[in-house]
Image: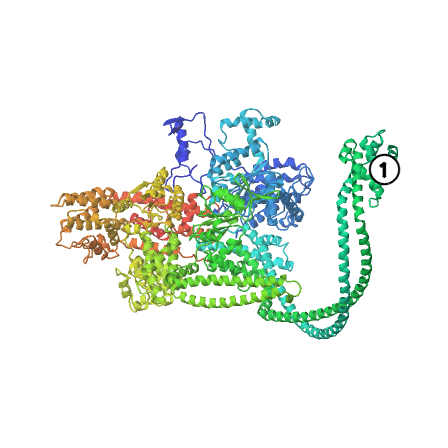
Amino acid sequence: MPQKTSAESPFQPPLELLRLWMDYGGWYDRSKCAWKYILDSQLVAAMAPPSGGRAVICNRTQARFHLVNITTPEDSQLTRIFESIMMPKLQEFDNEIKPMSRSLARATIGLYRNVTERFLPTPDKSHYLFNLRDVAKVIQGTLQAERQYFDTSKSMIRLWTHECMRVFADRFLKDSADDIGKFIEAMSQVMRDHFEGAEWAEVMEDIDDERYGPIFCSFMSETTEILPYEEVADYSQLKQCCEDKLEDYNLEPKLINMNLVLFKDAIRHICRIHRILMMPRGNAMLVGVGGSGRQSLARLASHIAGIGVFVIEITKQYRLIEWRDDMKRLFEITGVSNTPTAFLFNDTQLKEQAFLEDINNILSSGEIPSLYGKDELPAIYDGVRKRAADAESGGTAEELWAFFVDSIRSNLHVILAMSPVGSAFHTRCRFYPGLINSTTIDWFHRWPADALTAVGSAFLDNLTLDSDDTRAKISSVFSVIHLSAQDFSDKMLQQLKRHNYITPTHFLELSKGYRVILTEKRTELGNGRDKLANGLAKLVEARDGVEVMSVELEKKKVVCAQSQKDCENLLVEIVSERRVADEQRKQVEGDSERIGKEEIECKAIADDAEAELNVALPALQKAMAEVEKLDKSAISEIKAYKSPPKQVETVLAAVMILFGNKTDWTTAKKVLGEANFLQSIKGYDKDNVSATIMKKIKGYVSHADFKPEAVGAVSKAAGALCTWVHAIYIYASVAKEVAPKRARLKGAQESLAVKQASLQKAQEELAEVTAKVNRLKQKYDDSVGEKNRLRAEADQMELLLDRADKLVKGLAGENERWRASIGQLQNEIGRSLGDALVAAAFLSYAGPFDTQYRSNLVGGWLSAVREQQLPSTENFTFASFCALPTDVRQWNIQGLPADNFSTENGAISVRCSRWPLMIDPQNQANKWVRKMEESQLHIVDLKSKDMLRKIENGIVYGLPVLLQDVLEELDPALEPVLAKALIKVGNREVLRLGDKELDYNKDFKLYITTKLANPHYTPEVSTKTTIINFAVKQQGLEAQLLGIVVQKEQPTLERQKADLTLRVAAGKQKLVDLEDEILRLLSEAEGSLLENETLVDTLQQSKLTSDEVTRQLNEAEETEIKIDAKREEFRPAAIRSSIAYFVLDDMGRVDPMYQFSLDAYVDLFNQSMDKSRTSPKNITGTERCRQINVAHTLSVYQYTCRGLFERDKLLFALQLCLRIMTSENKVPKQEFDFLCYGGAGIERADQRPNPCPEWIDAGAWDNITALDSIPACMGIASAFEQGQRDWRAWFTSSEPEETPLPGDWENKVTEMQRICIIRALRLDRVLFCASRFVRLNLGPQFADPPPFDLRAIFQSSNHRTPLIFVLSPGVDPTAQVKSLANDLSTNVDICALGQGQAPVAMSLMNLGLRSGSWVFLANCHLMLSWMPELEKRIAEYCAMTEDMPHAPHCDFRLWLSASPSPKFPIAILQRGIKMTTEPPRGLRANMLKLYNLVGEEQFGRCQQRLKYQRLLFSLCWFHALLLERRKFKSLGFNVPYEFNESDYSICHDLVIVFLDEYPDETPFDAMRYLIAEANYGGRVTDAMDRRLVNVYITQLFCEQAISPQTEFNLAPQLSDSPYIIPNDADLASAKLAIKTFPQLDNALAFGQHANADIASQIEDSSTLLDTIVSLQPKVIDAGGESKEQKILRICHLMQEEVPPSFDAAAVRRGMGPRADPEPMKTVLYQEVDRYNILLLTLHQTLKASELGVQGLVIVTPELEEIIEAVLEFKVPRAWSTCYPSLKPLTPWMRDLVIPPLLLLKKVSI
């Protein structure tokens, strides 16, 4: 409320509004233009006493109130209050505890008084604020005791001690002040004073660590209904309980699993948070850096307490409206649903300060004002009405609302997770007191060494190690690594101003990573060793088998010879037996032939008979088939006839004839009735039918009615019998004819049988003989087979011996190498214990550091490893340990620089467990990732509309995503992705992103890059990502540029180099593959290795291939050495160009607009090489490098200067020169340090006396004595003693840098030493000396910035290159762009950006892209919020190829103008061509710039050519004079004016118009008036300044100026003036004449005294040196004083120096009677009053600063600003109200003392 508008203004707007209400009863409504009266309202205000840094309210406001001073209650009153609260509770306890209520109350109040006096809120401990609420919290905690668990006074004292430590001590910091130790001392004293016989040591006798006190909690005993608040006696039981609760939490569905290690500190924090949650209206503020476990432990403690956790989900569009909706939901849960809930809020979710205001209100009152609209209240009332009635609360709206608020306060527990990093924390605590007053603070300190060791040991439990001692050593090194990384981060912040936060998450990653890396490395090395060992065993087996096979081979040869002899003997016997067998075979074969013929004859007879029978057989078979169908029923059917039909009777008669029976029906019927009738039919002897029967039957079968068909029509059974009769008749008839043939056949067969029996006997005899022969033959074959087998075995053995010889000899080299490799691998397995430790540390911590810091870190870690006697590699490198050479070569091919730093970065990016966040200002990591992931990669940025959709696809389908061009803040919507917040749902791993649940694919990768060179990421970002510093280093850039220059100069050589690199890489890969193949074949071989011919042949071929590849590799490497030697000839060009780039890159730290891309620089380098080629191509590499260096250095200077402000052009040239000379060892470090720092820190006690104090002041003599300590300048101090006159003459010369030094010093010193001498004595000439230094060492063109030429810049651009004007005050480039567009006949559309102009600008751009017109977007700094959209649009059309349908028109140009701003998009700056539009420094440069604005066409417009040319020259001179005169500050103009080119352009046109209108007589008076009074004079407000302008224009616009007969002198004050209007003043001649002007302007050219510009020159020189110093790493002073000590010392010294205030009344009394002029007295009184105000302000603020640092007063923002300014030796704004000054604090203080002394002297005269 009492905040002032500014430090200079006493105006307090909020209080003035309140006063307006109280005075006039309301306020004016600006929207309705009407007065609003506030009725029926009164104002009650509260404030702290206005002292101790608290703001003072103005008297006008204070007078409107009735003041009531509310005093602090007395201790006796407080004791009575709290004793009354405790006494009823303690009456339940034993007699020993009952009377303790008074002692406890008095002890608590006494401790509170002690704490408030001893622990004060300093700037670093702004949360050390205590009030009576803290006393109440202690009493409230003590009242949780139950008589069953507290039965002695000692137990109650321990509980009280615990509560006091929780309320007071948990907020203390751990620093050198040891606040916890002091607090324990205070408690010990309070115990002795208020508890009889109580001593701290006695009370804490069985506590592990007195500094933490006892542990109390209420979740150990779950068997009782009410959980008791009791002391934990067994820590292991508490730990087990917490681990069980953690396991229960992780089993809960849809909760993110927490893999926590519950060490002692973590368990203590859980108990503290749980205690707060179980307290009525308990709220917690957990303070610690991100990753310290605040939120995880809060979630676990809430789970233990049975309280739900409410967390807001931040999205990209999350603002106050969404926040209020979430608060309504939270209030409904706690107030309406009556559900206990913990609201967990992280300060990273603080999108708007209004969030914190609402939280402050919740903590203070339980509600948020105006949260609900009137229409929402009835639903709330209805929701609580029933519970309110049950609680016997009223039913009115006010009572229901009060009940609702009370329910919220009862159920809602706010847990704030705040970070202490930066100033935001104590600022929030100051502005929102509820954050401290209404919460219990739990400070999460850096993990101590023992905690780190405990956590490390927990992660090593399941890891196989040699012993527990080794495990303890590794845990100890874990601790050292983490603490050293913290120290180096602090050091890097001080030296390089780079922020890096080391959090517990890094340590957890170290511990986990060590397990993973060690296991992987052991497995990898073990597998390699086992493969080699297996291969070696196979080789040994083959070699051992050779001797055995040789012996067996000799034995087999003897056996084989005997077998040959046995075979020959057996062959003789076989021949004899075979002769007998052959004779028998001939006889048997003859008999067999005859018998065979007889068999044929028998066969013919049988066939003939069979053929005749076959005629009758079908009919018989058919008949028999019909008979088969008959059954008893069919026969019975026939029998049933008493008088059968004629046909049936005939058939039966025929049947009876065949059976030899009577043919009457009775007989037939009788036969039919026989049981075997059918069998008789079927078995009838058809071969023996008599001729009588055949004759009888013939009469029947020949009868016409005796047909089966006719009979069957009457009776089927009779029909079947009819068929049978026919068949028997036919068969019998045939058989009768065949009978003779059968008889003959039978005789033949009997004869044949006899002969066959005889043949059979003969064959049996032959078989016996043949069998004997076969047995002999088999025996012979067996013998031959045995002989062949033995011979084959011998041959096989000989083959195996040959293979073994080949194998053993062929792999002899591998044998030895594998033996050595096995030993080496075994040693590496042992050393991996320490190597994996350092590698895991590197992976976790080293990413943000640069090369030097990484080297120091690794060195320290290796030392720690060796101190613990853990094995490790002597020359360990992370890149070689964690990256395979094949992978590194592939990365290099994909675009990763080949230096070791980049390789380390690549390995970290690929192996890190958190997503890599790459600091990539040169875009090299971006290109590498794109090439590495290729087509599958999704590329997004935070401005992409489909960013989340592409990330979702990547998560689901396992695709890589590149999130590029992020800034310091990441989109909160990405929080689940960054944190890998995976939820287990069944067997699925789900990631909840927004309102979607995505199945998480393990193949998903996320790469993040930023173009910011030095981003400041919060600890929360550091814990979720692995920050990797990918900023290009000189070594890597040098290698890249070397390749470029060789490619340009020796393309064949570079192609050979590239081919060789690929070939060597492929060859080495092939060697690895071949060895792996050999080992694979050996390992997969079963049985004897020598029996596998294919294997041996493959091994032999692999060996031959390997030898050939090795030979080729050796040749290639030899060739590569030759190529590298040839390439090294061009290294000087690469070194120079890399130096120039880093000088260029450093300029970005000078001004945020100085951003240059590496790609553009490489293009410039290529152009420089093309332009530098003037000699034949056969020149030497050294000479060619010289040409390139000269051309490229100049190109870089000229290219850069057009984008630099004038003040920085000399800085850039000097930096470039110094860096180049430093690389050539031409700039000693001592001399460079002196140039930067001068004689700062000289010890004057040992300083020799100043021989010339009258002209060498103390500071200059300090510089001289410091310079004397430099070896090259030793003796210079004594030279001043010996040659005072010469040195004084040199000192007083106008140009000492050009004047020879006295004595032999001119010949002794180098140019670097000369500039040091100038810096020591004549700081005002440092700029000129620096310019001379650059001119002599780099060339004169580097000391002369090129003039601004917009046409040339345009010609160097293309349609994809934005052209950016970096504006300076008073300069508008619009006219230049228009003029160029007119000259080129091009249309330009101009849009001045501002509110609502974004659609217009985008429309003009789209039109220009299509039509090819120009678009000029002016004042981009006024729409920085729209710049990301512009950046995206530029990137879109630049990414289009020419063949795309909407590709940009080739004539399109985008012109931008903007004032310098750190928020201007870096991508646009790097992509575009930057141009500064400030006037150049110096008359010469300004004149050239103005003439470059005049085109040939415009120059020829005027008809009075001669007059025009000379007056144009005068006008340019006039304009340049006015601009350059500003450098003299108040000596130039009384008021600074912003003249610009528009003034010049208007006057230029005016001159042309007047000359053309009045050709005879030039109207000088009119011209002078319009120029000096109307145009330029329109800006001039001071009368003396206006007179000066008129004097200039009168001198320059006169008859002499246009007279061709005279040389008109523009600067008549100069005796030998070079500033002459040339007689032939055409455009070219005028430019040549201007170039002859001196680069450094003499003050007389302006009509000033020669000393007029000394002050400005000193300021400019100091600025130059300060900027150079700012670009150097800071040197840390080890053991230096702290910030607080420094403030106290400076404030104390300054208070001694500040003079006392004047007694204004005494001054007036003393001066009143004196005869001094009244105006002088008036001025004197004013000076005294003004100085009194200043001196009083100084005394008050210095005293307040001392008290604020000590914590005795509250540090307000105004006081904090003063403290920061004093620390930086700057004059605070609050002190500059009296006499504005730009001086640093020390000279300002010296000047402050002088005027009061003069005033006192004047008053006393």
Residue 376 in the image, given as x and y percentages of width and height = 51, 28
Residue 880 in the figure: left or right of residue 24: right
Point 81% across, 38% down: residue: 699
**Depth check, front residue: 1017 or 1579:** 1017
Identify the residue under disc 1: 656
Residue 497 in the image, given as x and y percentages of width and height = 44, 53
Image position of 63 with respect to 979: above or below: above
**Depth check, front residue: 1468 or 961:** 961
Choose top left, top right, bottom left or bottom right for residue 839.
bottom right
**Depth check, front residue: 648 or 1598:** 648
Q: Taking the image as drawn, is residue 1709 in sight?
A: no
**Residue type at the position of mark 1:** Met
Residue 230 in the figure: left or right of residue 1232: right
Image quarter (top left, top right, bottom left or bottom right) of the N terminus: top left
Colouring rule applied to residues: rainbow
Image position of 879 with respect to 230: above or below: below
Residue 1009 in the image, given as x and y percentages of width and height = 46, 50
Q: Residues within 10 Å of mark 1 (few under 14, many from 20)?
A: some
Q: Taking the image as drawn, is residue 680 in sight?
A: yes
Which residue extends farthest top?
396
Image position of 920 with respect to 412: above or below: below
Q: Secondary structure at mark 1?
A: helix
Residue 195 in the image, given as x and y percentages of width and height = 63, 44
